[in-house]
Amino acid sequence: MTIGIERLRARRSTVRVDLQRFLPSFILAGYGIFILSLFARHIMSWYINPGYIGPTTLAGGVLVGLAVVRLTQRSASSCGEDSCGDSDACACGDAKPRLWTYPVLATPLLLALLFPTRGLASFSAIQRGPQIAGMTVFHGATTVRRVSLSVDTGSFSLQDWVGALSADPNPKDYAGKTVNLTGMVIHSPASVPPGYIMVLRYQVTCCIADARPVGLIVYDISHGALKDNQWVTVHGTMGAASYQGQQVAVVNPKRIVPTKAGNPYMY
Amino acid sequence: MVEATPFLLLGVVVSAIVHVFVSEDALLRFVPKNPILSIVPAMGVGMLMPVCECGNVAVARRFLAKGVPVSTCIAFLLASPILNPVALFATATAFRYYPSMVWLRGGLAFLVAASVGLLIGRSGKGEQLLAAGIADGHAHHHSHHHAHPFETPTGAWRALLRRSGQVSNQAGSEFIMMMQVLVVGASIAAATQVLIPRSAITDLGTGIVLAIVAMMSLAFVLSICSTVDAFFALSYSNIFPIPALLAFLVFGPMISMKSVGMMLTAFRPRVVAALVAVTIELVFLAALLLNLKGQIL
């Protein structure tokens, strides 16, 4: 009986030691593989600005490397307080994480596994406050693509229009210019005048934490048939309307074509 | 969190290299005994660190564990996310139509960080202010350090290899340690962003006092990286005055939902509470004073 208990204790002790040894490696590898998988699936830009993809992917590779090195080094059990001064494999000076911290660390990874990657939608736009191009300043090399109105505006993206209207918000300068733009629809009484919809996307500087919803006001020729989150391509010309005591650029559409949802972010 | 990972990793690798390759004596040789002068090298190191607040906490923890004075480490921790070249360049780019913002931001960050560091540093002895793990590590480090002489070329390679293993092991441990608080902080920040409409904060008021409060609250909740927050602040330039934007740009990188949790891995809770309170007061007062000095702006 006594021998049986001793064996059980020894087995429990082994399990504990193994967990302390392997869990950190699994967590490091988990984060590394998650990041590398975002890169491999070409969806990292749904989380961060493409300019940061290089260093972030490198970080994912380094995390996997750290996990492998930890696994190949000798057991954590040799890294006790007594042996710390002698053991070169030992990470001295820091308390070992408690076991309960591993579920905390694993939660984001599990959530990423359970829920597919999706872009921000109209709910977030309304929570963050959609901004009308021309009424908000969007300066800065990484946030504005400056454009010249001497070129054919038919090829302008929403981001081009945001840049142009930031530099020159006077809507009269754009009157009659051709507009072809794609984005998601929102109806927000607080941000959009009645009878109009906003076609917007999110301006991302660093990551989606700083994503700012910005769009153009479009006269609603569908008379309410278009719902929030519907992606559309608007073909029309630029005009002007009075809103909150200010003249703003609005799109007078000839056609509004429902389209497949795309990347909601502009970088 | 995806965005924070490379910065956090860079921070823990620098921390691990300092831990393994730099002895306490060598490190402390660069830190003047005078508390005020000791702030200078902290700012200098901060300017050389091209990482945001996520990475700096790991480095500050290591400096604390190596016996660098608390005041110096706090000054480094608070100032380096703003004084680093990437953040200053981003501020200059975003506020190219208002170039004074760069020196206003850098100058105010320097003053606030130095003041908070000196104030907190004077409030107690080193170990009384540090989190348990760091205080233990500090005491532990006095007993030995890792500087073993290289005797032969083969021995030198072996030692280098062993130390590289140590760096890797240490960096992995620290990454896990910092990541657990980053997960909690980022989750709270994300939940707040989703559940609370941003207008609830930005509509606080139009007077200068409430405008500063609104922008500081926004900075705390959003926890945006210091290297890009200038672009974000710019989009509020038509709503809030310059002193409120400045408060956002100085306060956010120092204190946010994300960074407070990470600070708790380095300092005792009461120290973090004091640090947060003093920083709020100083940034708020500085922004108010700058508003009174309207002609400067």
Image (spheres, coloured by chain):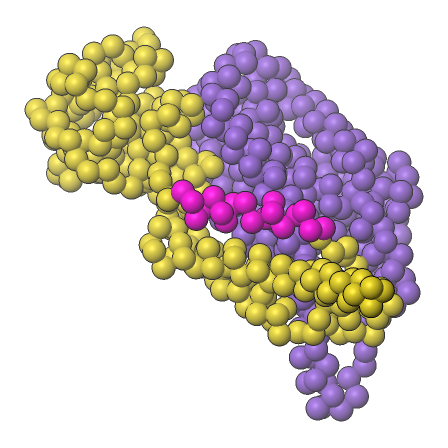
Residue A193 point in image, percent of width and height: 27, 12
Q: Which residues are magenta?
A: A98-115
Residue A164 in sight here: no
The answer to whether residue A152 is left or right of residue A101 is left
Residue B282 point in image, percent of width and height: 72, 27
User: Main SS type for the magenta part?
Assistant: helix
Report which colour depicts chain B: purple
Residue A187 point in image, percent of width and height: 28, 18
Q: Residue at x 89, y 42 (%)?
A: B128
Which residue is more in the foreground, B174 or B8? Answer: B174
What is the number of callouts on the image?
0
Which quarter shows the C terminus of chain B? top right
Residue A219 in sight here: yes
Quarter of the figure with residue A178: top left
The vertical placement of A244 against A85, above or below, is: above
Q: Residue at x 40, y 42 (%)?
A: A115
Quarter of the figure with residue A54: bottom left
Q: Residue at x 12, y 30 (%)?
A: A257
- Quick check: is B229 in the magenta stretch? no
Q: Residue at x 37, y 34 (%)?
A: A120
- Quick check: is A114 in the magenta stretch? yes
Outermost residue to the left = A254
Which residue is more in the foreground, B227 or A197? Answer: A197
Which residue is more in the foreground, B261 or A248? Answer: B261
The answer to whether residue B222 is left or right of residue B14 is left
Residue B22 point in image, percent of width and height: 77, 67
The answer to whether residue B225 is left or right of residue B262 is left
Quarter of the figure with residue A185: top left
Which chain identifier belongs to the yellow chain? A
